[in-house]
């Protein structure tokens, strides 16, 4: 069987993969994107709302428009569509993978690999809801596909469980398309989505948001007929007697996103229990040398602009053949829930380092500081930070700076 | 009086305070927040994105948006006009499908996808 050789292969043709590809093309001759679906652009095709591209293009574009602009930057790059990777290994030097596509099976040998497989939704099966198994229960992304691509309404009276951004955006879409959204129910005591989506998707249309409330059971033999909501206490235990039955014909679940990690597991990448993605260093390189991970496959981002940025950065780092690595753990204080990169290669420190992080709880009037040993290499003040908002900051590193420790801290201002 | 509001221009979502006696905005990280707060109190505007039916089975609906934001109170009538439209020919992203939608001067509905 004949092998096809590439300098760099990118798995996934969404925004992270597209940006990886055009950035890689500046440094490599033979670049291949492998995409499972029949077109590039990933989930952007069904995200018809606006707000994409604010930082990258200084415009508020819809998802398909943003995808079109990014795809236009691809030049002389091989793209395999309807292509599924079924085997992948790495030896000391090379990555070997096989995929099947409509034109047959392909065996690829590559120097470098970027995993840009995006994320998936937490499904109804992953959260505990008792009762029957009727039709009419969708994830927010499924409902989005149903409405925005197929042109059909999933229901006339809709309940939304979870206040993630896609759920909020679907609440507005369903209302504008003529359905009644009875309410959004969130088990936590604060919303999961961005504040601006609470305002423009819920408040604008008088859709109630019920915090500390979840759905305990569903009813309906074939088709969903009702759901039962229940309030929860601070330990997320159901409060007896607070149940309420609500008639509805659709339940939409917006309960979080998780990196798609099957490719990473096949390659034996070290995974992070915090992000559910792989552990990478400041070059976006995983525990396996020359295997990189970007976008929502790395950790779930808020903004596509940031997703595209990670793709560009990783592909640019991929051009360097690094010295042997020496990895240390990036540490952070108790106010932060996670930081990417989780490890730091102190033998190959680049001049600019990206840090993505989220806070554990709402914080006001604070300063984020990044320490390299005892020296502050980055600091910025924030009026307010919320857990749903991912921060992406870029720290400049002086030439020949040596360090043995990297630490992120959130310090409260003295008033 | 003081009005508290969340800026929806960008994902920062600044918490703004608009004092209408002094005509002064605080809490904004950028000048767009000031413009947003004043307009939001006087006459709130929103972008509308929506779907238009086509007669093609391969793409039963295509996505559209307006060329600019409109008054919040006009959203319903714009949605109605968009809902009544059916596209019956191949068209390209960026093309105008309804000019001056719902008799709003200068407000056009444009395609955000190709009709293939």
Image (cartoon, helix red, strand yellow):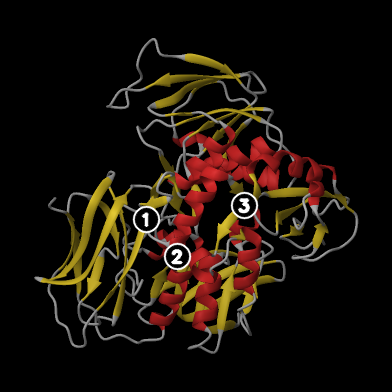
Which class describes the residues within 10 Å of circle 1: few (<14), some (14-19), or many (20+)? many
- In percent of the image, x 81 and y 48: which residue is there? B103
Distance from disc 2 to disc 1, alpha carbons, whole Å, reads 10 Å
Q: Which of marks 1 and 3 is nearer the N terminus?
A: 3
Q: Which chain does the numbered disc 3 sit on?
A: A
Residue marked by disc 3: A49
Which class describes the residues within 10 Å of circle 3: few (<14), some (14-19), or many (20+)? many
- In percent of the image, x 55 and y 60: which residue is there? A52
Is the same chain shared between marks 2 and 3?
yes
- Give x and y (percent) for residue A156: 69, 28
Quadrant (top left/top right/bottom left/bottom right) for the N terminus of chain A: bottom right
- Give x and y (percent) for residue B14: 39, 51
Q: Is residue B93 above or below residue A396?
A: above
Secondary structure, mark 3, is loop
- In percent of the image, x 61 and y 48: which residue is there? B46
Of residues B67 and A15, which is closer to you in this image? B67
Distance from disc 2 to disc 3, alpha carbons, whole Å, reads 18 Å
In the rendered image, the residue lying farthest to the right is B88
Secondary structure, mark 1, is loop
Question: Quick check: marks 2 and 1 in contact, CB under 8 Å?
Answer: yes
Q: Which of marks 2 and 1 is nearer the N terminus?
A: 2
The answer to whether residue A158 of the structure is visible from this angle is yes
Q: Which chain does the numbered disc 1 sit on?
A: A
**Residue A292: quarter of image:** bottom left
Residue marked by disc 1: A390
- In percent of the image, x 34 and y 87: which residue is there? A321
Q: Is residue B98 above or below residue A326?
A: above
Which mark lies nearer to you, 2 or 3? Answer: 3
Residue marked by disc 2: A306
Which class describes the residues within 10 Å of circle 2: few (<14), some (14-19), or many (20+)? many
In the rendered image, the residue lying farthest to the front is B21
Secondary structure, mark 2, is helix
């Amino acid at each position: 069987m004949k092998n096809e050789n590439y300098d760099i292969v990118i798995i996934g043709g969404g925004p992270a993969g597209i940006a990886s590809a055009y950035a890689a093309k500046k440094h490599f001759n033979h670049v291949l994107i492998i995409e499972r679906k029949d077109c590039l652009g990933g989930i952007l095709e069904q995200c018809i709302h606006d707000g994409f591209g604010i930082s990258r293009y200084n415009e508020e574009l819809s998802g398909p428009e943003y995808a079109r602009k990014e795809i236009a930057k691809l030049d002389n790059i091989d793209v395999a569509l309807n292509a599924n990777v079924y085997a992948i290994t790495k030896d000391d030097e090379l990555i070997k993978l096989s995929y099947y596509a409509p034109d047959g099976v392909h065996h690829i040998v590559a120097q470098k690999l970027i995993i840009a497989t995006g994320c998936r939704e937490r499904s109804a099966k992953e959260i505990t809801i008792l009762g029957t198994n009727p039709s009419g229960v969708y994830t927010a992304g499924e409902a989005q596909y149903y409405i925005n691509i197929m042109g059909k309404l999933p229901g006339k009276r809709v309940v939304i469980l979870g206040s993630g951004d896609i759920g909020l955006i679907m609440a507005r879409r369903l209302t504008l398309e003529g359905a009644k959204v009875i309410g959004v129910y969130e088990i936590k005591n604060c919303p999961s989505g961005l504040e601006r989506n609470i305002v423009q998707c819920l408040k604008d249309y008088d859709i109630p948001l019920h915090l500390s409330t979840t759905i305990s059971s569903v009813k309906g033999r074939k088709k969903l007929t009702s759901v039962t909501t229940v309030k929860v206490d601070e330990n997320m235990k159901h409060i007896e007697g607070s149940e309420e039955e609500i008639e509805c014909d659709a339940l939409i679940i917006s309960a979080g996103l998780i990196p798609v990690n099957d490719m990473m597991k096949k390659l034996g990448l070290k995974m992070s229990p915090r992000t559910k993605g792989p552990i990478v260093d400041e070059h976006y390189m995983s525990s396996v040398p020359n295997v990189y991970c970007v976008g929502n496959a790395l950790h779930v981002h808020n903004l596509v602009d940031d997703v595209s940025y990670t793709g560009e950065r990783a592909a640019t780092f991929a051009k360097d053949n690094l010295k042997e690595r020496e990895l240390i753990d990036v540490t952070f204080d108790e106010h932060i829930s996670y930081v990417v990169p989780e490890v730091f290669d102190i033998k190959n420190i680049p001049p600019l380092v990206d840090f993505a992080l989220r806070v554990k709880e709402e914080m006001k009037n604070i300063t984020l500081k990044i320490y390299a040993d005892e020296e502050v290499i980055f600091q910025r003040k924030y009026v307010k930070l919320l857990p749903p908002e991912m921060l992406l900051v870029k720290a400049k590193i002086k030439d020949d700076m040596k360090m043995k420790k990297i630490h992120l801290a959130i310090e409260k201002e003295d008033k | 009086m003081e009005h508290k509001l969340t800026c929806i221009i960008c994902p920062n979502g600044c918490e703004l305070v608009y004092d209408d006696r002094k005509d002064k905005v605080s809490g904004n990280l950028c000048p767009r927040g000031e413009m947003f707060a004043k307009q939001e109190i006087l006459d709130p505007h929103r972008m509308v994105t929506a779907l238009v039916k086509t007669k093609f089975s391969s793409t039963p609906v295509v996505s559209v948006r307006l060329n600019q934001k409109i008054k919040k109170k006009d959203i319903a009538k714009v949605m109605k006009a968009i809902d009544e439209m059916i596209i019956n020919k191949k068209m390209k992203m960026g093309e105008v499908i309804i000019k001056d939608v719902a008799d709003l001067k200068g407000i056009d509905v444009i395609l955000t996808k190709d009709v293939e």
